[in-house]
Every structure is written in structure tokens, then in C-alpha cells.
Amino acid sequence: MTRTSFALAGLIMLAGCASIMSSATSRMADNITLAILNQNDLETVRVGAPAYLLMLDGLIEGDPENTDILLSGAKLYSSYTTTFIEDEDRAKRLANKSLVYARTALCIEVPYLCQALPAKLAQFEDALADTSLDELPVLYGFANAWASWIQVNSADWNALADLPKLTALFEHCLKLDESFDQGGSHIYLGVLSTQLPPSVGGKPEEGRVHFERANKLSGGKNLMINVLMAEHYARMVFDQELHDKLLQTVLAESADVPGLTLINTLAKQRANKLLQESVDFF
């Protein structure tokens, strides 16, 4: 940041203080998000998380160009919405806020890609190709929020029209570093590849490869991967043996893993439900 002033020394000191405050605020936002992700009681999070969401809103109001806080807000709003919100209108509002925060961060960090978002797929991919590893956190954070927004707005054909761009974004994240967020891009691509049967363009076997790679990159600690593979891949190819094995593995494992406890607790709950439905489904 360039500053021009007669009292240069004083402004440098103020800039230093501002930097320290910004860093401290970012750590607070990260710690809030991590505390929620480490919670093993879903009801506590459902009831208590809105207070933290409002706190993050306040932190963003006070530092609106801090991309770390923006991405923390986007992540928490996205996770809370897709996990707990059943009311359609409310889910759309909260998912939209997540997307706005993530898009703001993207526009600050990678303005040329932000400008290419409304463009045709080829132009978007050209802009995406110019991004680097340093920009991966904001690319992935935006992709995460975008995926949740599309999920919540899945009845809107305009939202579904963005799926090719979203897929290209996750594929580029893989090229930059497939291990980022313990293989998170593989998880999303696994789901995207198994939305449709092969007869109408689906790629379930590619999806299986993504799920298995994500599981390896997470060291088997992210239990939701097996749940998603069972629900989206095993059910699509009608493989009950694999379906039940994946879910039984989830139920046999501990949910308590730093940074994954909340998602693992949800995974065990979902695995139990899917396993109970197995006989009727197959």
C-alpha cells in the first residue's frame, strides 16, 4: 500500500497497527469457524451458530476488504445453510450472503476472473488459466460458496447453467494443488460427476475415482466422503454391497477429528439413515 503524507513516520506506525488489528481479526474469524467445525453436537451448532454469523457480519462491516474474514464468513454461512436450513426462502437468502462474501473476496484478489464470471465458458476458462497457486484459497472458497448457492437454487435453470463453470473452477483447483483442503475439490467433482446416469451424460466412474482420491488425501478422516460415495455413486450403479460397506465403515469410525468433527457427526447421522433405507432402495 502506498501512502503519501508529510507525517510519513506517523502513518507508517498507524499502518502497522492497522495490519496487526486486521491480522488479529482474521485469526478471530478463523477461530470462530474452527470452533464450530470441531463441535460434535449438531443441535448446539444449529441453535448457537447464528450468533457467530452475526459476529462475522460485524467483523466484515468493520474490515470489508479483508479477504480472510470474507472467506471465513462465506464458509460458515455456506456450511450452516446446507446443513441446517430447511426453509427454502431462508436458505436462498443465506446462501446468497455466502456467495456475496466469497465473490467480494474473489473480486479483490483476482479482479480479472471476477470480471469473466458472466462471460461464456471459453472466456471464463481463459481467465482461470492465468490464476496461480497463491490465489488457490480464494478460488476454492468462491467455488465452495458457488456450489452451495447452486444447490440451494437447483430449481432455477439459470443457476444450473453455471455448473460447467463451477466444474472448470474445481478442476483448475485440482491442477493447482489437489491436496488443498484435504482433497476437497475431488469431493465436489465426485458429486458433480454422479448427478446424472451415463445414458444422459453422467460420469459415475469418474466420480468414483474422485471420491476414492479424496478419501486417500484426507487419510480416511473425512467420513462424509464415504457417505457421498454411497449415496451418489453406489446407488446410481446399484451396488448394494459397496453401498452398505461404505456406510458401515462410517458408523464404525470416531467422529472426533480436528476440523472435521461437525461434518463427521453429520456423516454418521446420514449414514445411519441411508443404511436403514438400503433394503427398500435396492
Image (spheres, rainbow, N blue to C red):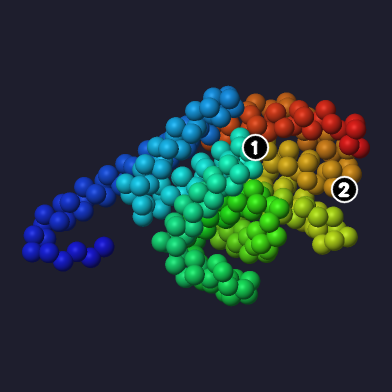
Q: Which mark is residue 86?
A: 1
Q: Nearer the viewer, residue 136 or 35?
A: 35
Q: Nearer the viewer, residue 75 or 206?
A: 75
How crowded pointer 1 is (Cα within 10 Å; few <14, some 14-19, many 20+) is rated as few
Above or below for 147 versus 85: below
Q: Are marks 1 and 2 in contact (CB under 8 Å)?
A: no
Amino acid type of the residue tagged 1 in the rendering: Glu
Please say whether residue 278 is visible from this viewpoint.
yes
Q: What secondary structure is marked by label 2?
A: loop
Residue 69 placement (x, y as % from top left): 41, 47
Please say whether residue 188 is visible from this viewpoint.
no
Residue 67 placement (x, y as % from top left): 41, 53
Residue 161 placement (x, y as % from top left): 68, 63
Is 35 placed left or right of 4 in the picture? right
Mark 1 or mark 2: name the one nearer the start of the chain.
1
Amino acid type of the residue tagged 2 in the rendering: Val
Residue depicted at 76% across the width and 43% down the height: 229
User: How far is mark 1 from mark 2, CA to CA?
Assistant: 29 Å
Q: Quadrant of the N terminus?
A: bottom left
Q: Nearer the viewer, residue 185 or 116?
A: 116
Q: What secondary structure is marked by label 1?
A: loop
Residue 102 placement (x, y as % from top left): 49, 53
How crowded pointer 2 is (Cα within 10 Å; few <14, some 14-19, many 20+) is rated as some
Q: Quadrant of the C terminus?
A: top right
Query: Number of marks in the image?
Result: 2
Residue depicted at 80% across the width and 58% down the height: 203
Residue depicted at 21% across the width and 53% down the height: 15
Residue depicted at 78% across the width and 41% down the height: 231
Is 223 placed left or right of 274 in the picture? left
Farthest residue in the left direction?
A: 6
Q: Which mark is residue 237?
A: 2
